[in-house]
């Protein structure tokens, strides 16, 4: 299947893509005899030790060594005009695909945990913390982060080419208007967007190498259009048992329409979202409020194969002085959760990576 095919193609490429965080072997700011180590030349002029033609280097300073390291790494990452915090998270399907080896990623050696908290992992590719210096007189630590241009360029080039291979195999899995074909294409968009990010960085480090891979790159915009075409050709019927005035079915339909799928009342179509909602009354321990416990169990089912493609389950409880009002609140909460969570569940569908 898809995963097995890709792993054999990408294994060498993925294994070849590695990043080292060098353990500083040079001045740490303390002399053996207890005297202050003189200020290294790189503190004020990084290029005096790490020539700008060969390296991208930046110095960070702070009251503690870990914070100095963070600032140095952020300064190097800023050369690419990237987001230099760690708040941007990869999607669940990207994390799974990287773990499975179906999408290439750089293997980062151990960085200080504070760096990983404040710097996005992709911004650490090719960066090494080379040296530290402690200015004991002024209670200040200095750290220099260095990216060797030739090494980093090779890393980014390898990442891009490995992901191009992955994208092409995803495209090869698109042969009809099915949920699987949509998932292939939609995820190919995400990988192509990541490749554009890598390409932008490679263009800064080595324009010639960037130009060499440009012709083989796949446009995420074109893939997005193709994904929408597939979605528009797939009607989905939604049937929810114990629905409340059709509100839950409408919530599902709203999410599907927002992504690009058609919805229908015809149960004879290939894909159906079928589910059941249940409500249960209970009282609080002090008997002052009444609870309405709710649960929704549903699946998107491929009626042609009988396969339950995407499960979606939510549960919770709402309280009020009356059960009727508690149930009203529960109904609103179910609608809210369907709207907020089902789209992400569909987006993270990765059946094709686990076959």
Image (cartoon, helix red, strand yellow):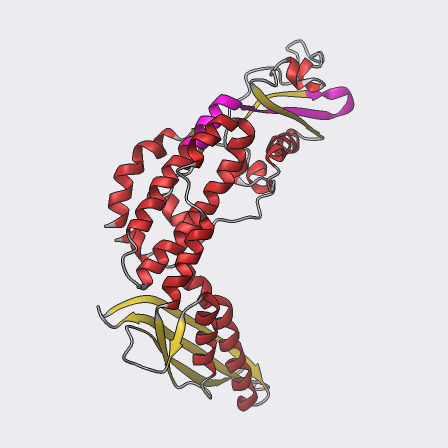
Which one is in front, 196 or 11?
196
The location of residue 334, given as percent across then percent down, is 49, 77
Would you place residue 18 above or below residue 310 in this image?
above
The part of the image, by quadrant, that contains residue 9 is: top left
Q: Which residue is drawn at 68% across and 21% down?
A: 134
Q: Position of residue 94 (x, y in %)?
A: 42, 49
Q: Residue furthest front?
A: 215
Compared with residue 89, is residue 112 higher up or lower down, i.e. above or below? above
Give the percent coordinates (x, y) of residue 85: 60, 43
11 up-or-down from 283: above or below: above
Image location of residue 322, percent across then percent down: 57, 90
The residue drawn where x is 42% and y is 35% is 159
Q: Which of 100 and 280 is in front in this view?
A: 100
Q: Seen from this angle, which residue lies furthest right? A: 138
Is 138 placed left or right of 102 in the picture? Answer: right
Q: In this view, does 353 lie to the left or right of 106?
A: left
Is residue 285 visible in this depiction of the protein? Answer: no
Q: Does the magenta stretch include residue 318?
A: no
The residue under the point 51% across, 85% down is: 327
Magenta segment, which residues?
134-157
């Amino acid at each position: 299947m898809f995963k097995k095919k890709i792993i054999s193609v990408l294994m060498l490429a993925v294994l070849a893509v590695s990043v080292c965080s060098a353990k500083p072997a040079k001045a740490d700011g303390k002399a053996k005899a207890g005297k202050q180590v003189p200020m290294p030349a790189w503190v004020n002029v990084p290029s005096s030790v790490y020539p700008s033609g060969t390296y991208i280097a930046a110095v960070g300073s702070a009251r503690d060594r870990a914070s100095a390291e963070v600032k140095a790494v952020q300064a190097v990452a800023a050369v690419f005009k990237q987001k230099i915090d760690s708040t941007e998270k990869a999607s669940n399907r990207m994390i799974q695909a990287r773990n499975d080896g179906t999408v290439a990623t750089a293997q980062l050696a151990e960085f200080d945990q504070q760096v990983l908290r404040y710097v996005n992992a992709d911004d650490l590719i090719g960066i090494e913390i080379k040296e530290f210096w402690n200015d004991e007189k002024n209670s200040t630590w200095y750290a220099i982060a260095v990216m060797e241009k030739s090494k980093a360029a090779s890393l980014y080039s390898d990442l891009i080419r490995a992901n191009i291979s992955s994208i092409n195999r995803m495209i090869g899995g698109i042969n009809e208007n099915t949920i699987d074909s949509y998932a292939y294409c939609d995820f190919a968009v995400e990988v192509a967007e990541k490749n554009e990010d890598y390409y932008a960085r490679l263009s800064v480090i080595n324009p010639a190498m960037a130009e060499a891979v440009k012709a083989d790159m796949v446009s995420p915009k074109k893939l997005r259009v193709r994904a929408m075409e597939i979605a528009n050709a797939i009607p989905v019927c939604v049937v929810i048992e114990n629905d409340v005035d059709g509100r839950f079915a409408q919530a599902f339909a709203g999410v599907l329409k927002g992504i690009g799928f058609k919805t229908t009342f015809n149960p004879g179509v290939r894909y159906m979202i079928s589910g059941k909602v249940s409500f249960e009354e209970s009282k609080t321990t002090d008997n002052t409020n009444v609870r309405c416990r709710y649960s929704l169990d549903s699946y998107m089912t491929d009626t042609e194969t009988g396969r339950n493609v995407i499960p979606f389950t939510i549960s919770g409880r709402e309280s009020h002085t009356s059960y009727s009002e508690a149930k009203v609140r529960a109904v609103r909460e179910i609608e809210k959760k369907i709207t907020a969570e089902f789209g992400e569940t569909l987006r993270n569908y990765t059946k094709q990576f686990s076959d």
